[in-house]
Amino acid sequence: MKNLMWCFMMIAFTVLLVQCKADDHNDEIASLVDSPNDTPNLNPRPPGGGGNGGNNNGGGGNNNGGNVGGDGAIDANVLDDRGLPQNIVAPADNALTTAKVELGRLLFWDPILSGEQDVSCATCHHPEFGYADGRALPIGVGGIGLGPARQDGVNDDIGLVQRNSPTIVNAAFNGIDDQGNVNPNQAPMFWDNRANGLEEQALLPLHSFEEMRGHAFSEEETLEVIVDRINAIAAYRNQFQQIFGGNNAVNAVNIGNAIAAFERSIVANNSPFDRYARGDENALTPQQIQGLNRFDAVGCADCHSGPMFSDFDLHTLGVPDNPLLGFSDDGANGQYEFRTPSLRNLNTTGPYFHNGVGGDLTDVLNFYRRIQGNGGGNGGPGNLNINPNVNRNQIDQDARNLRLNNNDVQAIIAFLQTLNDENFDQQIPGSVPSGLPVGGNIQ
């Protein structure tokens, strides 16, 4: 009888153990992407530190990173509510699926979307440069080469793209608030917030004269021509039909949805800071924690807030114009307003500011020292003067209230390094259905 009871106990324990493991596996898959159906494994890495904690992103109070004692020791409670979520929220009408992401990848790399069929989305958003292009101002139509080495290949009137190329890494989290909530339909896009959501953003560069359209057709004809081009390729027709269904699966909306799905899948949410935010107190060095504390104390976090370290609002800073443009870019509303950029992955996405005039992070921080109350105007530190078209009273009050000193610069830069995570999807297709050079004229 005792042996029989022991067997029953062992069977029950085994069943319970198997069920727990199955539940853990299902929870792990569900935590990756908040959208139904055939969801891709977008974050195969194990999370660092403690649990995610839902929309609180591992929070355990908002102590913003703890403190460093006189001996360099870290306070026990290091949880910070600014870690990125480990899941992605997609719009209800554009569920994230593996097939859709892969179709979007092909479209992203296919020059058939450009007027002269020589430029792709990837030309200015290349994984080698953190899905930016490493240039102050991009060269789109007519260019040859990649990144800083890219040159204007033809003598035409197209010129440079007006603003610095922002990375698409973590664009899935654009607009995320301090509680970790994301509305993918309202996510602000571009330096002037002129678009909402990746679906809308994905189609706008196709219309841009400098970026992708060129002289090939008028802006009004853009989407009609591109849809016809893609519809003429059997491989694309079959993929669109399988993914979207319907009689006219190849259309502008579905092109935008596929590209947006790919862009949304490019996430980097396991930086040292993210691991620290989840409770791994060894993820940051004492100097980096000191930089985090100074970042908060001097007022940087007033605008560079939340898990993306951006409030995604428009601010006037008086950044000088890029002389390569030949005119003054007055930003949103004609007030020299530009969106607060994310501070994530700065290692690979410089140069900085909306026009790339910030060559490195020291330049950027010294410019902030100039515009703060004790910066001394154009006589202050660094080599970036305040834009002469911007009255000092126009400069954002939070920026003028900064309390940066020279000793803060290196500590804050050390902290910014903790926001880098270069372990994201960098896969380049071997070919694209159009048969054109992958990525355009980037060789």
Image: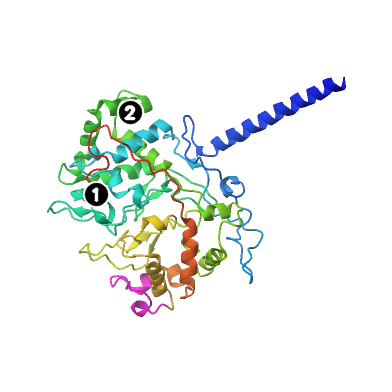
**Reading the chain from its start, which is encountered first: label 1 or label 2?**
1
Q: How is the image coloured?
A: rainbow
Image position of 162 (left or right of 183): left
Q: Residue at x 19, y 39 (%)?
A: 221
Q: Is 63 covered by the magenta stretch? A: no
Q: Which mark is residue 211?
A: 1
Would residue 300 be seen by someone viewing this image from the given angle?
no
Q: Residue at x 64, y 69 (%)?
A: 69
Q: Which mark is residue 240?
A: 2
**Of residues 26 and 386, the one drawn nearer to the viewer in this rendering:** 26
Residue 32 image point, x, y percent: 52, 39
**Of residues 186 and 310, the one drawn nearer to the viewer in this rendering:** 310
Please say if 374 is above or below 64: below
Residue 236 location, quadrant: top left
Q: In the rendered structure, which segment of residues is drawn in magenta?
A: 375-395
Would residue 137 be seen by someone viewing this image from the given angle?
yes
Residue furthest to the right in view is 1
Give me the C-alpha separation between circle 1 and circle 2. Answer: 25 Å
Residue furthest to the left in view is 155
Judging from the image, what secondary structure is the residue with disc 2 in? helix
Residue 80 location, quadrant: bottom right
Residue 281 image point, x, y percent: 61, 57
Q: Which mark is residue 168?
A: none
Residue type indicated by callout 1:
Glu
Neighbor class of circle 1 (other Cα within 10 Å; few <14, some 14-19, many 20+) is many
Are the two marked residues, 1 and 2, in contact with CB atoms closer than 8 angstroms?
Answer: no
Residue 161 image point, x, y percent: 24, 54
